[in-house]
Every structure is written in structure tokens, then in C-alpha cells.
Image (tube, rainbow, N blue to C red):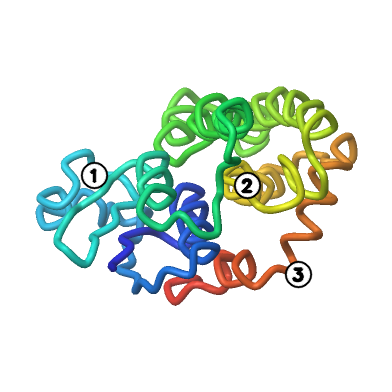
Amino acid sequence: MILHGYWRSGTSYRTRIALNLKGVEYRQAALDLRTGAQKSDAYLRLNPQGLVPALETDDGLVLTQSPAILEWLEETHPEPPLLPRDAAGRAQVRAMAAVIGCDIHPLNNLRVLKAVRGLGADQAGVDAWAGQWIIDGFTALEALIVRYGEGWCFGGTPTLADCYLMPQLYSARRFNVDLAAFPRLLEIEARAEAHPAFIAALPENQPDAD
């Protein structure tokens, strides 16, 4: 498999975590988002939206949008599971993931932040913009983890929610968000920092990191 992504992209990061947790072998094709490599003709033929990640499977399928990729991985590589066995548990994990994937991350991705800067915001303004959505989402997520977590976001093993959480914690620090109010999130982060699948997915451990 080939994962087209960028070392610091949150969506690429969450996909790497899931691939690693599943034990799926893949190689990476780096696209530098800062130079607009994702808008090249060659990549647009692969992914017409011009976003990362895109996953080329061994049988020639091209998958885009990280939620779809992670669900495909769960369906085609069911062990170890990243979703609970019961429907109610699966719904809760998907909701946790959506707190980040739908309500936090889209508001602090590269193209949105470029638009915020285009409206005249300096770096402090960008940090404030990103920080307010991160804090709102993390406040809800912290409460959900208190309710459902047993060492990870949901239960005692990593799930899709943890794949989403680690990249967003990484981004939160980039925007100087104070995380002291989120002890459960930080406990999960500490556990992930000792887990080989999460370590291998870290942005600084990618071949295109600079």
C-alpha cells in the first residue's frame, strides 16, 4: 500500500496510527502542503479534491478522506479491532472521533488557517481562533472519556477515537493551548507515547519531517 500524506497533517497522522495498530505494511509518498504539492496534476488525478491523505491499496483501489480510510481498514483488517463489538459502543467511539474530525480539526487545518490569516489575523489571532474550538471540543471529549474510558478513550484498548485524539493534541500544542484542564486526555497521551504504533506514527518520525 502507498499512503500519500504529509508528516504534520493531522489526517495523515491519524491514518498512520490506524495502519500501524492494524499491523498493515505501507510505504509513504510525501506531499509538501506548504508548496502546494497536493494540487499537482498528477495528484489531482489520484485525488480530485487535492487533499491528504490518499491510500492506494495493493489491488489498485484509491481511498480518500481519513474517516473512510479508517472504516475500510476496520472492515478489511478486523484484528485488532478499533471499534467495539456492540453497536452502542461503536456509536460512542464514532461520536468521540467526530468531536475531533467534524468539530475541531476542520477549523484548524491549513487551508482554514490561511483564510483566517487572509482576514488579517496575526499568529496570536490564529492561535486564539484554533484554541477556542480545541478547548470546546476537548471539554466535551474529557467528559465522554470519564464516562467510557478505561485507560484509552473508550474501554481498555486503543480505538478509532484514540487515532483522532493524538494528532489533535499535537496540534493543540502548536497553537499554544493550555491542556491542564484535560487530565484524562493527557493520561491517554502518556500511554500512547509508550505504544509502538503511536510512536512510529509521530510526525517527527516520518521520512519527510523537517
SS class, disc 1: loop
Residue displayed at 24% across by 61% down: 57
Q: Which of marks 1 and 3 is nearer the N terminus?
A: 1
Q: In this rendered view, identify the residue nearer to me: 70 or 190.
A: 70
Identify the amino acid type marked 2.
Ser
Q: In this rendered view, identify the residue nearer to me: 186 or 44.
A: 186
Q: In this rendered view, identify the residue nearer to me: 69 or 165.
A: 69
The spot of residue 131 in percent (x, y) is 69, 31
Q: In this rendered view, identify the residue nearer to me: 158 or 119.
A: 158
Q: Cα distance, mark 2 to mark 3?
A: 19 Å
User: Which residue corresponds to mark 2?
Assistant: 171
Q: Is 46 on the left-hand or right-hand side of 26?
A: left
Q: Is residue 196 above or below residue 51?
A: below
Q: Is residue 110 above or below residue 16?
A: above
Q: Please identify, in this view, whether the residue under mark 1 or under mark 3 is nearer the observer.
A: 3
> Circle 2: is it few (<14), some (14-19), or many (20+) Cα within 10 Å?
many
Q: In this view, does 183 lie above or below 157?
A: above
Q: Is 184 on the left-hand or right-hand side of 68?
A: right
